[in-house]
Amino acid sequence: MDWIREKHPGEGGPAAIGIMGGTFDPIHYGHLVTAENARHFFGLEQVIFVPAYRPPHKEDRRISPPQHRLAMVRLAIASNPHFKVSDMEISRRGPSYTIDTVLTMQRCYPAARLFFITGADAVLEILSWHRVTELLESCIFIAATRPGYQLGQLRQNLASLPEALLRRILTMEVPALAISSTDIRQRVREGRPVKYLLPEAVEEYIYRQVLYRGS
Ligand code: NAP
């Protein structure tokens, strides 16, 4: 099967921008490596991190307040001149539909090709996303996979998409995604180390703000 392509060098062209979507609770090196690899591999001019205000499928799950997640992203990307952060989903409030974000980015960068970068597990459910056809017509998806990720489930879930749209979903394996936000939150809760899993400034922020201590 070739419709989920593993590699797509130079896809970006000169005016290509990555939109890095996620909850980032907290941001970690897996996310940063994903963004940097996508930037390099697809020739993106910049990658804009967009922390979700409320991921649409997480209405019932407790996530950290958006100002903390945004602050941690700011700290994490500070040293990379190609990385930016946008608070557009946080300012917009309500469910963070990716189509709204992509259409806003289109208005901000009318000449650019847009790439939406996120985790493959999020993309698994893309058929249930708001205005999915329009979304896939508006940007190319880069679904980052953890080591050992089996593409079978993704292929199965996407099988009903028309070929032309399937071709707009690319996958990229990122070994550093062995790190996960869930694991980091659990480590902090249990008093285990998180050093070297995320930038020091983010680690300090977590301890200073006493995040992830509750159940
Ligand atoms: P999630 O369910 O928290 O994450 C699914 C998996 O992907 C997790 O393993 C996660 O690892 C990983 N992941 C998340 N963002 C990543 C990134 N940028 N790079 C690499 N791995 C990433 O997913 P989510 O954060 O809630 O949603 C992802 C994005 O999809 C968000 O921007 C969200 O708003 C969007 N979304 C939109 C719709 C819609 O428009 N209807 C529906 C669902 C999701 P970590 O836990 O380690 O991050």
Image (spheres, rainbow, N blue to C red):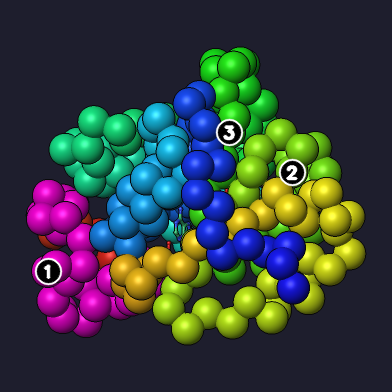
Q: Amino acid at mark 3?
A: Leu
**What residue is pinned by disc 3?**
114
Depth check, front residue: 137 or 94 = 137
Q: How many marks?
A: 3
Q: Could you tell me how far apart the alpha carbons at marks 2 and 3 are, in whole angstroms?
A: 10 Å
**What residue is pinned by disc 2?**
136
- Would residue 33 be counted in the magenta stretch? no
Q: Amino acid at mark 2?
A: Leu
Location of residue 195 in the rendering, given as x and y in whole percent from the top left corner: 12, 69
Location of residue 60 in the rendering, given as x and y in whole percent from the top left corner: 60, 62
Whichever of callouts 3 and 1 sits on the residue coming sooner in the sequence is: 3
Q: Can the viewer see residue 148 in this picture?
A: yes
Report the residue at 33% width, 48% height from top. Answer: 36
Report the residue at 22% width, 46% height from top. Answer: 76
Mark 1 secondary-structure assignment = loop
Quadrant the C terminus occupies: bottom left
Left or right: 176 as drawn, with respect to 95: left
Q: Can the viewer see residue 91 in this picture?
A: no
Mark 2 secondary-structure assignment = helix
Q: Residue furthest front?
A: 9
| Cβ at disc 3 under 8 Å from ligand 1 | no
**What residue is pinned by disc 1?**
195
Depth check, front residue: 182 or 190 = 182
Left or right: 129 as drawn, with respect to 199: right
Looking at the rendered structure, which numbered label has been put on residue 76?
Answer: none
Using a 10 Å C-alpha cutoff, classify the residue at mark 1 as few (fewer than 14 neighbours), some (14 to 19) or many (20 or more): few
For residue 104, what is the image quadrant? top right
Part of the protein shown in magenta? 181-205
Depth check, front residue: 99 or 167 = 167
Left or right: 143 as drawn, with respect to 204: right
